[in-house]
Image (spheres, rainbow, N blue to C red):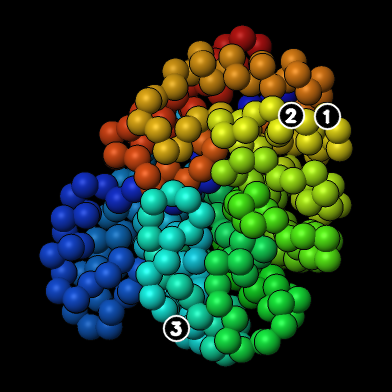
Amino acid sequence: MTELVATTPGLYPLPDWAKDELSDLKGHQKGDLIDGEEGAEVVEAYGRARGDVVDAQVDAGLDRIVEGQLRWDDMLAHPLTVHDNVETGGIVRYYDNNNFYRDPQVRGELTASGDVAAELDAVDADGEALQAVLPGPYSLADLATDEHYGDEADFLDAVADFLAGEVEGFPTHETLFLLEPSLVEAPPGDDVDEHASEAIDRVAAASEADVVVHTYWGAVPEKTYAHLMDADVDAIGFDFVTDADASLYNINEYGTKDQVAMGLVDGQNTLVESAETIRDRVEWVEERTHTDFERAYLTSNTELFYLPVNKFEDKLEALGDAAALAEVDA
């Protein structure tokens, strides 16, 4: 019987009180930790907000706990936008989600910064429940502007090495989610498919945890998916909200890993799915793939940043309840 694990891809909305408090801090932009007294206030506010979203996950019964990435104003680009050798350019839109972020322009060597590791160190959760979240190397390279390496392949290698260095500094964690929506939105193409898979491999190898490459905004094109299957990861994530049929086709045509991440909850729609609906969707996938998965991560298809806080918390609860239903059924 498939083990069902309730989790999320992270990138949560700020609690309402934190939005108000942080906006009142003079000169503060989320993601910029300023030196001095004001910086201490910002750090303390984020610490309390982190505690709130960790508590929300625990209360919802999630099996994996993420840090929440509340500082990630620039979403997936955050690990670069806070780097000393990266300048943040003008405002750009990533993908087609009506949210705007700063353009990270890489002007020097990408060395590990320890920024994400410090966030994970601050999470009050057992290592056996902790889930780390990072952008995948292909998506991070796709969202950045290279002003230093001068070659697309070299730049992807540099981003992969940078992320691997970040992972090496992580505390003990049970799962690592690498978020790779660019494999769908801006697929690598014939000459880069294999290289993108190798870059993912490099980051995954830096972690001793189970590694999930979560893709979303649709389904990965066939050839890109076939190369992704070559990556030595434990699971691939599928967006069954945006394009269930194409996701099923990839699984049935090219196979998948023994574990899978099922994006069954809509990360952008305020309509809250019931636990029963999520379980029905799990069965729908299992019946149509004819695959006996060792483990299925039940998750939202995208980040949950786009939701109001109350709807975000309701969706956490639905995911936790869906996994708990499986235990009752067993």
Q: Give neighbour class at mark 3: few <14, some 14-19, many 20+ (Cα, 10 Å).
A: some
Give the Cα separation between the discs numbered 1 and 3.
43 Å
Give the SS element for disc 3.
strand
Report whether 89 appears left or right of 288: left
Q: Is residue 229 visible?
A: no
CB within 8 Å, label 2 to label 1: yes
Q: Give neighbour class at mark 1: few <14, some 14-19, many 20+ (Cα, 10 Å).
A: some
Q: Which residue is mark 3?
A: 87
Q: Which residue is mark 2?
A: 248
Give the SS element for disc 2.
helix
Q: Quadrant of the C terminus?
A: top right
CB within 8 Å, label 2 to label 3: no
Q: Position of residue 300 (x, y in %)?
A: 52, 36
Q: Name the residue at the top extreme.
A: 329
Q: Which residue is mark 1?
A: 252
Q: Quadrant of the N terminus?
A: top right
Q: Residue at x 82, y 20 (%)?
A: 290
Q: Residue at x 86, y 33 (%)?
A: 253
Amino acid at the residue labelled 2: Leu
